[in-house]
Amino acid sequence: MRSATVALQPRGYGGVVQRLSARGSGVDNHAWNAMMVAAQAGDASSYHRLLSEVVAWLRRYYARRLPPAMIDDAIQDTLIAIHEKRHTYDPTRPFGAWLAAIARYKWIDALRSLKAKPTEVLDDDIPVADHEEAITSAWSLERLLATLKPAQSQAIRLVKLQGLSIEEASKATGQSAALVKVNIHRGLNRLTSLLRSESDAD
Amino acid sequence: MRTEPLIDRLANELKPVRRRTGWSDALALVVLCAVELGLFLAMGMMRPDMPTAMHLASFWWKPASLGLIGLVSGSVAIMSLDPVRSPRRGLRWIMALIAVCLASGWLLEPSRDGFSTLTSRLDWVSGLECLYTIVALSVPAVIGLGLLIRRGAPTDHAGTALAAGLAAAAWGAFVFVFACRFDDPLYVAVWYSLGCGAVTLFARCTLPRLTRW
């Protein structure tokens, strides 16, 4: 009869638990078995420790299977299921396989609930602000300013682009206020003539 | 809600539990079935021609087949209450067993009269009565298995419900064998199959809804 109802342990249960143990998660199957046996006998401190360790395992388990927003709910559902069905754990078999079976069952439940609460499908053309013009403008301006004398480009950058006053620009550059004005004037004229010549060429 | 408060709450609520074992579930089910069979026979429901019927191979074919199907199905259902066990492979064995039982019935008494006597052999009126009685006799087993499923932790509700339905139906039919005066394998194959099918379908549709956890 035993062969007729072969224990069809879903693939990879034991493997998953062992791999996680090996990665230093602190998972010790024998310790978990012992803690669960103690929990079945009513030992609250062992049970608390077991559940705390199980949470870390469950978080990793669901992180690879569910959207981030659903992970906490799935973990809590699984903890409640472990609590309600703790009498079904058989101490002669590994706790990891039992836990993995319950986690998988709750994962399928979570996927079903996801199906029952359909998320809104996003349009392929999501309207977002187009920054292309700003990027192109900034790049073009830098290219034009680079053609000016350093004193002219610096004065234009500080006063016209960064919004400093003539006096502040004068202090920042070490130029006199009158020279700052002259450099701005000459620089803008130079830029205007450059743009005109470029548009003529086009 | 964060997980730490939940863990604290669950740990504080912890009480010792009595472990579930397959043997204890099986024992509870056997007691229930024995009581049902005892009551059924005590009510004087046994067929009057039982001594004669006991000399027929076709009579023994009925309880042997139904008992075997009920035993295997019940075992599969109970074992699948453990979350790490799936009933799927067991269900395949049950289907094969049903096919073997039906084939053995046909070998026991193959129809030599073709379809000419089909209507009289099937006896619609008695057949419907048989169907109704099998369904009624399956009810205690369905309830018993439903309670066991609720207490257990099956992870394949559909498969477990199917196995439980087959077990309950086979048991209901097994009990009815002692009252049914028809031993014709064709009659049994048709009406018993319909009765068992109805019980199995009912269990398959209702038990998964009532036993979710």
Image: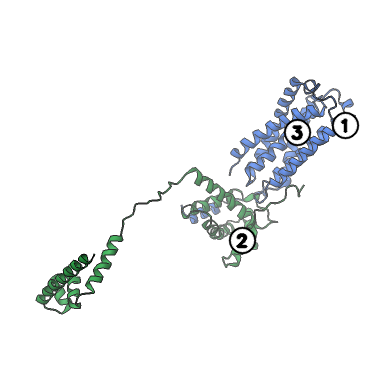
Chain colours: A green, B blue
Q: Chain of mark 2?
A: A
**Rendered image quadrant of residue B43:** top right
Which percent across, then down, holds residue B168? 71, 35
Tag of residue B35: 3
- Assess whether mark 3 and mark 2 are in contact (beta carbons under 8 angstroms): no
Which percent across, then down, holds residue B197? 70, 32
**Rendered image quadrant of residue A58:** bottom right
SS of the residue at dot 1? helix
Which amino acid is tagged 3?
A: Val
CA distance separating discs 2 and 1: 54 Å
SS of the residue at dot 3? helix
Which percent across, then down, holds residue B59? 85, 30
**Furthest residue to the front?**
A201
For this rendering, which residue is in front, B22 or A44? B22
Q: Chain of mark 3?
A: B
- Assess whether mark 3 and mark 1 are in contact (beta carbons under 8 angstroms): no
Which amino acid is tagged 1?
A: Ala
For this rendering, which residue is in front, B80 or A123? A123
Tag of residue A42: none
Badge 1 is on which residue? B57
Q: Is residue A103 left or right of residue B131?
A: left
Q: Is residue B54 left or right of residue B122?
A: right
Badge 2 is on which residue? A17
One can see residue B16 in this view? no
Q: How many marks?
A: 3
